[in-house]
Each structure stands twice: as structure tokens, then as C-alpha cells.
Amino acid sequence: MNKDNISKSVIRRLPRYYRFLSELEEQGIEKISSEKLARIMRATASQVRQDLNCFGGFGHQGYGYSVPNLKEEIMNILGLHNRYKAVLVGAGHFGTAIAAHMKFENLGFELAGIFDNNDRIVGSYINNLIIQNVSELESFCKKNGVVAAFLCIPRGAAPDTVQRLYDSGVKNFWNFTHFDIQEKYPDAVVENVHLSDKLMTLCYSMNCGG
């Protein structure tokens, strides 16, 4: 199958496969059937097979899947071996938590720089990375070959920040703002994260179950 034709829903399930396979490997489990993997994924065995067949299958008749091999294959598909250089913009409480606790090196990225416009925190450190003034953003990105940005800034600051990043060659965004990047930059690659949406969905589920 042409990978350009693989649905977003399949792609969004890949990290879950990787996470569950990592847990199985830590438990010392060497192989797993599509039926057992489906139960863990809360899916059907046919869906698991269809998902994995998009990338080559990887299973063996009568054996199932090798846990470490399948984990490695999915890691390669996701590109987790890459070290894409990225910057984080916005070192407030949320941005600091992201910078301090995310294991970017295991997720395909290298956090190369952290930026903020608050003079009170500029010059301090998060995990051995100095918080730099956002005025240095363009020159840093160009000098260090940055290709991705993690946006932990208020929505009002997003349009100007994205413009500056885009003009510096950064076209890949992990976006925690509510700014619609792709409306203005359709060639940008964006993963939007709306935590409030997820919380409202939880509230809905509790409301319906109550």
C-alpha cells in the first residue's frame, strides 16, 4: 500500500501499538497473537492485521508477532530513531513541565533550545538548557538547523511567533495553542493538542453515565 494513502486513524494508533509492545517487552513477553494484541488495543484482530498490513504485516502464520521485532518495526515507521532538532517556545508552568519531563530523545526529537519573553526566567535552566530570550529565536533556529517547534504560549502570541518560526524554516509544530496554523500555512505539519477538549469529553462521559 502507498503510505500516502494510509488513513490518519491508522497512523494515530501506531503510538499505542508501540507503547503496549514496549510494556509487553518489559514483561519479558517474546511473542503475541493478533487476538491478544487486539484485546490490549481494545480492537478486533482483523483491525490489528489490517493496520499492520499497511506497513508490511510482520506476522507469521501459527506464530503471531515477535514483540521485540514488531516494536522495532513500528519504531522505524514512526521515525523514533531520528533526532529532529526542536525548540520549545513558552517556558511558563506548562512549558516548563513539558521541557522537564518529556523524554524527547525517545520520541524522535532533540530539544535544542527553550525560549520565553519573561525577563525573570530568561537565563535560568531547565534540564541543563538555558531559557533564552525569544528575540534570539530566528538566529538560533537558522544556526542550529531547527525543524520543529513546540508551542506552549498564549493564543495571542501564536500568530507572530509562528510567522517568525516559519520564516526561519521551521514548518513542523506541536501546537498547544488554539491558533489554527494550517489555515495560514497549509504546507505546515501540525499536531494540535487541545487539553480542554479532552477534559470536556470526560465531563460528557461522566454526565451521560450519571
Image: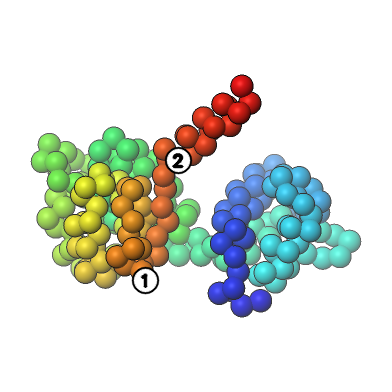
In the displayed structure, 170 sits above or below 25; it is: below
- The answer to whether residue 127 is seen in the rendering is no
Q: Position of residue 116 (x, y in %)?
A: 19, 46
Bin the neighbour count of mark 2 within 10 Å (Cα to Cα): few under 14, some 14-19, many 20 and up: few
Instruction: Tell me which residue sits at (66%, 50%) in the image.
Output: 21
Foreground mark, 2 or 1, reads: 2
Horizontally, is 39 left or right of 89 in the view? right
CB within 8 Å, label 2 to label 1: no
Instruction: Tell me which residue sits at (36%, 69%) in the image.
Output: 186
Q: Nearer the viewer, residue 6 or 80?
A: 6
Instruction: Tell me which residue sits at (47%, 34%) in the image.
Output: 199
Name the amino acid type tagged 2: Asp
Residue 83, image quadrant: bottom left
Q: Position of residue 87 (x, y in %)?
A: 29, 56
Horizontally, is 84 left or right of 36 in the view? left
In the displayed structure, 169 sits above or below 89; it is: below
Q: How many marks?
A: 2
Horizontally, is 76 left or right of 28 in the view? left
Label 2: which residue? 197
Bin the neighbour count of mark 1 within 10 Å (Cα to Cα): few under 14, some 14-19, many 20 and up: few
Mark 2–mark 1 distance (CA, rounded to whole Å): 25 Å
Name the amino acid type tagged 1: Asp
Instruction: Tell me which residue sits at (22%, 63%) in the image.
Output: 163
Label 1: which residue? 187
In the displayed structure, 84 sits above or below 36; it is: below
Residue 60, image quadrant: bottom right
Residue with the most extreme top position: 210
Quarter the C terminus occupies: top right
Residue with the most extreme front position: 208
